[in-house]
Each structure stands twice: as C-alpha cells, then as structure tokens.
Amino acid sequence: ILRGSVARPHLKPYMASLQLDGQHVCGGFLIAEQWVLSAAHCAEETDGKLFQVLLGAHSLTEPEPHKRLYQVRAQFPHPGSNIHNNKDDLLLLQLEEKAELNADVRVLPFQREDRDVAADTVCEVAGWGTIDHSGTRPDKLHQVERPVISRDVCNHRTRHDGTVTRNMMCTDSRRKDTCKGDSGGPLVCGGVAEGVVTAGSRVCGNYKKPAIYTRIAPYAAWIDGVMASADG
Ligand SMILES: O=C(O)c1[nH]c2ccc(F)cc2c1NC(=O)[C@H]1C[C@@H]1c1ccccc1
C-alpha cells in the first residue's frame, strides 16, 4: 500500500496473507469458514506448491493472540485466468480445516448484485504489499482509502486503453495506491467486498495507471459452485 497508514490492529479480521516458505506473497480474504479468495496470478510461480494462509494477523512476524497459519487443502484458479492478461484473475483456496472464528478472524461478505459501484465512491483496501517506491515490505498491515473511477475513464487511451472489462473496476492511483504484494486483497466499499486487487504487474502510484480490481459479483455463481462441489 503506497502512502496509506498502518491499519488499526485486527480491525480487518477477514484479511489473509498467502505465504510460501514463511514469506508473504499476496493478500486474500476469508469468504467462508474454510475458504479464502485471492488472485490467480499470485499462484503463477509457486511451482505447484500450495500456499499457507495466515489469518488473525496484524504483524507478519510478532506473536499475536489469534494469529494462526493454516494449511491449504486445494487451490482453484478461475478456469479463465491466464498469464497474458488480467481476465478472471481469481483464486479460491480451501483451507485444510475450518478457520477458528473469533474477534481477529471473521468472514467478509462479498457483493452478489452485479451492478457497478458508482464513480467517486470511496472504498478501502489493505495489505502487506510494498509501501514505497524502494519496494519496502512492511511488517504490519497497511490500509488506504481510494475513490472508484468510471470504467470509461479507466479505459481511456492514455490509461488502460480499453483493457478493463465489465468484470473489472478501477480506483484512482494518484499518489495513494495498492502495490506489489497487495494483490488478492479485497476492495471494501460500505463494508462489502466489491473487488479483488488484480495481480498483474502494474506501476503503482501513477495516476495514468489506475488500480484494477476483479469485480466479485459476476463470479458469485462460480464461487458458490466451487465451494459446494469441493468436499467438506
Ligand atoms: O502482488 C502481486 O501483484 C503479485 N503478482 C504476482 C504474480 C506472480 C507471483 F509469483 C507473485 C506475484 C505477486 N506478489 C509478489 O510478487 C510478492 C512477493 C512480493 C511482495 C511484495 C511486497 C511485500 C511482500 C511480498
């Protein structure tokens, strides 16, 4: 998160850190007791290894009361996701067991109504991604508020030039922005997850390149289908 602030500890109890060998790779969030939603690109270089999912955390390193690392039983990248673009950039992770819910570990509801969030709506996004242009990696969760910008503005020739589909949305990236490592986290508007930070490589903090999110509502049926069909 660029030019945001340290989040109030454990006030975003749905936040997940997707880790490999103890290293944060991407964000994610709890959508059900045994399920985390993130971005498919994040699993591109895992060489077939499964993530581990850290829940209940504020600091990535310090001991905290409800912090716990969960094994992943299975990972389900959206079948339409691919390395060439940001389409269908969603990843469902089934935890090895149901997460123990408490004050620091909670499910975040996601939007099921497929209607664009109005431009200028101020939403919030959080993550353990880079916090400056030197690529500094924070230990604590950061957050930032960002206004939604219209798809037409986001698709302008000088911005994302028509690559933002109806299944995506954008927020203003002037100065304050998401950045590497924040991908997979939720864009929360009015207490509901409306989008997932896309994990394609993107310059951060440049107003010419707004942040892009995968809208969740268009994928509600896919999400429900995977959760229903997987065992347990
Ligand atoms: O964050 C992303 O957009 C993104 N997209 C990817 C695609 C493949 C892939 F193998 C990884 C990623 C990845 N995450 C990262 O590189 C994470 C490792 C870097 C990081 C930044 C800040 C703090 C901690 C760690």
Image (cartoon, rainbow, N blue to C red):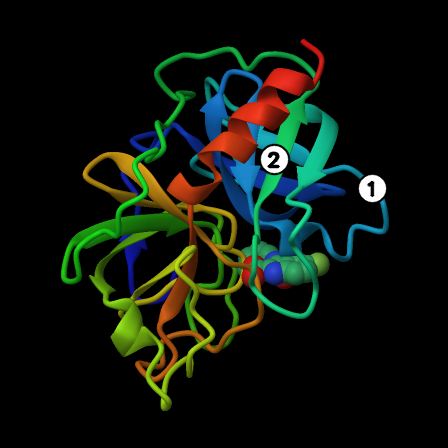
Q: Amino acid at mark 1?
A: Lys
- Residue tagged by mark 1? 49
Q: Secondary structure at mark 1?
A: loop
Label 2 sits on what residue type?
Answer: Leu
Which label was assigned to residue 87? none
Front-lying residue, 197 or 161: 161
Left or right placement of residue 183 versus residue 53 in this view: left
Picture coordinates of residue 37 (x, y %)? 53, 36
Q: Secondary structure at mark 2?
A: strand
Does the residue tagged 1 have its C-beta within 8 Å of any atom of ligand 1? no
Crowding near pointer 1: few (<14 within 10 Å), some, many (20+)? few
Which of discs 1 and 2 lies nearer the camera? The answer is: 2
- Quadrant (top left, top right, bottom left, bottom right) of the N terminus: bottom left
**Which image quadrant is residue 84 in?**
bottom right
Residue at 34% over, 16% down: 103
Whole-percent x, y for residue 195 in the image: 38, 48
Residue 96: % across, % down: 70, 18
Instruction: Farthest residue to the bottom: give it.
Output: 158
Residue 92 image label? 2
Q: Quadrant of the C terminus?
A: top right
Q: In this rendering, would 103 be left or right of 227? A: left
> Which residue is drawn at the image coordinates 55% and 15% (left, top)?
99
- Residue 1 shown left or right of residue 232 in the figure: left
The tag earlier along the polypeptide, 1 or 2, is 1
Above or below, 87 relative to 65: below
